[in-house]
Image (tube, coloured by chain):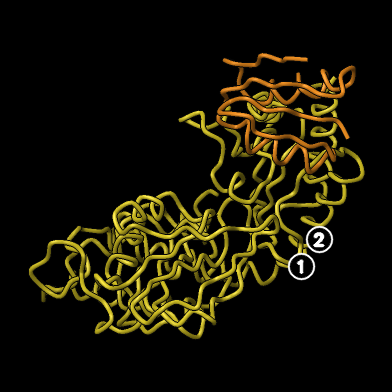
Chain colours: A yellow, B orange
Amino acid sequence: MPLHPVAAAFLEDAFARGWADPAKIHQASRKTALLFNEAKELFASHLGIRADQVEFLSDPALGFHLGVSGLLTAKGKYFYSGVDRSELFALAQLHDGQRLDVSLNGKINYPSGGAEDVLVWQAANGETGITSSAPNEFSGKVFVDATASGNLIPLPSRWHTALWNSRAWQGPAGIGIFAIANRSDWRNPLPHIDHRVSSFDFSIPLAITSAIALDNYVREYKEHQVNLLALNAKIRHFLLTQIGDVDIAGSLDSTLPHLLSFSLLYVDAALLVNELDARGITVDSGSACNSANMEPSHVLAAMGLLTHGNLRMNLHLDTSEESVDHFLRILKEIVARLRS
Amino acid sequence: MELDCRGLRCPIPIIKLAQSLKSHPEVLLLSDDPATLPDLTAWSRMTNNTFQILEANTYLVKKT
């Protein structure tokens, strides 16, 4: 999704006022520190954490390693699922992880686990939008992957580390938010000489801009949620009744309203994406023919969903019913042609 | 009937398979595309057909 328009308008100001090192004593530094602290407060209130728990990462993907490896001890087992991010698959090789099966509707049966075990809880899947119920039965430590759900799903009652990606709320790329519930549960897996979570630099102006984006996104999502849900329902109904031979990921009540993934039988996704693009409609695909490594989406494969002819939709907050009708009309026409 | 789809990428093997099943009750599908196994699984669920993996890249598909 593009940068939130309010954040985009604020970006230049953020760099003009937030360029200094907040740890210094100059006037410019004090201005930056003020803005930066306000940003931390905004993140804390919207994400359900304390301001002193907010840590920034210039590469959100680093947070997967910090979140999992930082909790894991030599005695603990690492549990992840087939729909988790590829970074968490990479950690499974490092920690001899145990992969949990995912059902067709996206449900995962969590183990009860031991006190030293670590489980990934993906609040919502970024490809399909399917949300998961909190792993309340798991007695070990929980890493929350909120990179796709952002502020839309609250933290579970028991969590140990958590990661968000600024992109989830139309914030700028290159900002991740990482939190540790209790420092005594966590040991820094990175080489370090002080208490900082990461010694990698991050952009304070971008972090401030991200907070502005989040603050606006939270308010606007609430305003548009009912409309997004109705549009999502309309698309699902049209696919099933007017197009047919379609595999839709998850049910309406188990997915985030603005996300939708579906696969059309006997359709080449690359041709479909290109034809839609030529008609001014931008959609993504999880099909092999559309991926850099020519492998199908591991998320669709893990759930047993059709991997070819896949489209991933991300409905913008201001999507109108007319634009959805326009898309569906064009989609029906292209699919009929590609299937003939 | 044997259907050799080796070297063909998705969705071609599944499209050719569906066409072949119109005139044959059983098809021996040879396909080395990484999407074929997940797609056969989903396709058989969606179309109420069945398949068995005989060996790597070799599937026996039956119309039901």
Residue B60 against residue A138 in the figure, above or below: above
The residue tagged 1 is: A226
Residue B24 against residue A267 in the figure, above or below: above
Q: Are marks 1 and 2 in contact (CB under 8 Å)?
A: yes
Residue A208 position, x and y percent, is: 36, 66
Give A247 or A119, whichever is nearer the viewer.
A119
- Residue A230 numbered tag: 2
Determine which quarter of the picture holds residue A152.
bottom right
Task: Assign a secondary structure to mark 1.
Answer: helix
Residue A198 position, x and y percent, is: 21, 64
Q: Amino acid at mark 2?
A: Ala
Q: Is residue A53 left or right of residue A252?
A: left
Q: CA distance from mark 1 to mark 2?
A: 6 Å
In percent of the image, x 47 and y 76: which residue is there? A47
Give A116 or A260, whichever is nearer the viewer.
A116
Q: Amino acid at mark 1?
A: Val
How many marks do you count on the picture?
Answer: 2
